[in-house]
Amino acid sequence: MPEGLLPTITLALAVGVRVLARQGAVIKRLSAVETLGSTDVICTDKTGTLTHNRMRLRSTWTPHGTPSGSETAELVRAAARCTTVTRESDGRLHGDPTEIALVEGAAGHAAPLDPADRDAHRRACFRFDPRLRRMSVIDAGEHGNLRVIVKGAPEAVLALLAAGEPTGEARRAADALAADGMRVLAVAVRELPPGPGAAAPRRQDAERDLHLLGLVGLHDPPRPEVAAAVRRCHEAGLTVHVVTGDNGATAAAVARTVGIGTPHLQVITRSESIDDQELDHLLRQDGTEIVFARSSPETKLKVADALRAHGRIVAMTGDGVNDAPALHRAHISVAMGRSGTDVAREASTMVLTDDNFATIVTAIESGRRVYDNVRKFIVYIFAHLTPEVVPFLVFALSAGAVPLPLTVLQILAIDLGTETLPALALGRERAEPGIMSRPPRPSTQSVINKGMLVRSWGWLGIVSAVLVMTGFFYVLWRAGWHPGDPTGPGSPLHHAYLTATTATFAGIVTCQVGTAIAARTDHAALVDIGFFTNPLLLAGIAFELLFTAALVYAPPLQNLFGTAALPLDVVLLVSAFPPLVWGSDEIRRWARRRHHGS
């Protein structure tokens, strides 16, 4: 029974959680660290995750071609008045980043906005509706005349224009701005006739027969570290889909900038209308990454369900209240710590304190590292079972002609004393080289597989058992023992027998040292990770050697555990066991790398 299995796995997961928290990812469930290691699909938002979420007004367009200063000022002033941002006591603006960019852009075009003055002249506000993709306000001008200001997605606003408005030209201009990676908003107005119901009409009555003022293009630069993170995803066999409410051309431009969709990017411009059959067909295409543009929270839920049905392990990002169902459906749900809502954070498995896509990739790498470390610990702890069992088999099969090479108390000293700290230290091992260059493991793969058992029981275990029994028989034969000779208390060979069992005990411990060094890597050579890169393991090895020396040479412990002081030649013999165990496994791994490399 591997007594240290539970604490070591728990510690490995807990350490992974702590490391990720320092790197910007707060994990709310320990088991999620292991799930991260098998993630093979990431469905990510665009704004704030791939980009900085720091909008800047970069371009404007008016129906009259090259806009004059007055036309641009009227356009940006109207866009800024159709916002809900507030100004804090320290002068900073608070609200949606898109609307903050509009207010700051207005100030940059000689049309500064005072939020208090804006609210004083406002008669009604129809807040942004993600399904309608627009917002509108009723504003009282300086002379008391009322007008409706509407801003939103170009396709949503242009559909409400009055007859004769330049709809076609505006669509072409919006496409050109979006192709440059900008978020495009259309701004339109309508003068309201005077009357008792003018200040409080219904939304559908207010948002009609509009006059187009123009388009504004907002630029949100991609995070510089995202391109490298996406490249690591592709090297690791992960697929990255973008699920965003933005325009398809805008999202596609950003996706291509950071490397998503290389070599092939599929853009779904109206994700809300996609049916299940078409969605299944799209998601089954190997090597294709998809931008789901103009998507809704329901779209996220459909994508998550479809990917799960295909057997994929899904990480899904979200920040809104309505994203909670999709976050619940994903295997790894990722909420934004800065821009996300409390509901999204509550529904998530992982919260990004920096809202950064690169942190998701770091978390996946950490999940793979933790999973590998658990397997390394299992290899280590299973390997010494063979040299513990073989002495009893030799005793039993010889019908007692060979005395018992190991006592029960010595086994307990190994299982509960010498092996624990090195095992815990293996749970802190760094990632092996190439950990993000191999494909995700299948979700059905067991932690323990045939190869691990062959390595631990069949290779490391047998090598250790041969060395340990060599040390046992060396001590007995040196004392003149022959099979069947009595070794009990009072017999001439009793002290030699105690020395031999002590050699068996010390041999297993030193073989553990070699196994611990060998278990640090599963594929790479030890030189690739460095001998001194895990100081906790070195400390654990030092502890078990000191603990063994105390049991061997301290008289009170000698009487308790049935040990005897080892002479120098036996000490030198068992001291050679660690390099022999580690070296044999190093040769095995070298041969396997050479075989797979050829």
Image (tube, helix red, strand yellow):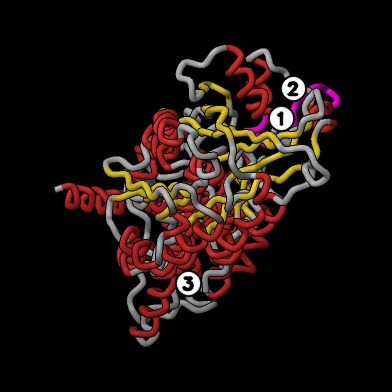
**Residue 336 in which image quadrant:** top right
| Residue at (58, 18) in percent of width and height | 72
Please name the amino acid that badge 2 sits on: Leu
Q: Nearer the viewer, residue 223 or 110?
A: 110
**Label 2, on which residue?**
113
Position in image of residue 436 (x %, y %) = 38, 45
Q: Looking at the image, can residue 395 be seen?
A: yes
Q: Are marks 1 and 2 in contact (CB under 8 Å)?
A: yes
Counting residues from the N terminus, which is met first, the one under dot 3 or under dot 1?
1
Name the amino acid type tagged 1.
Answer: Arg
Residue 190 relative to residue 245: left or right: right
Which element type, helix, strand or loop, lies under badge 3?
A: loop
Is 409 inside the magenta-drawn segment?
A: no
- Nearer the observer: mark 3 or 1; the answer is 1
The residue that label 1 is drawn on is 81
Q: Position of residue 533 (x, y in %)?
A: 48, 38
Residue at the spot x=50%, y=60% of the render?
Answer: 35
Q: Are marks 3 and 1 in contact (CB under 8 Å)?
A: no
Which residue type does callout 3 highlight? Answer: Leu
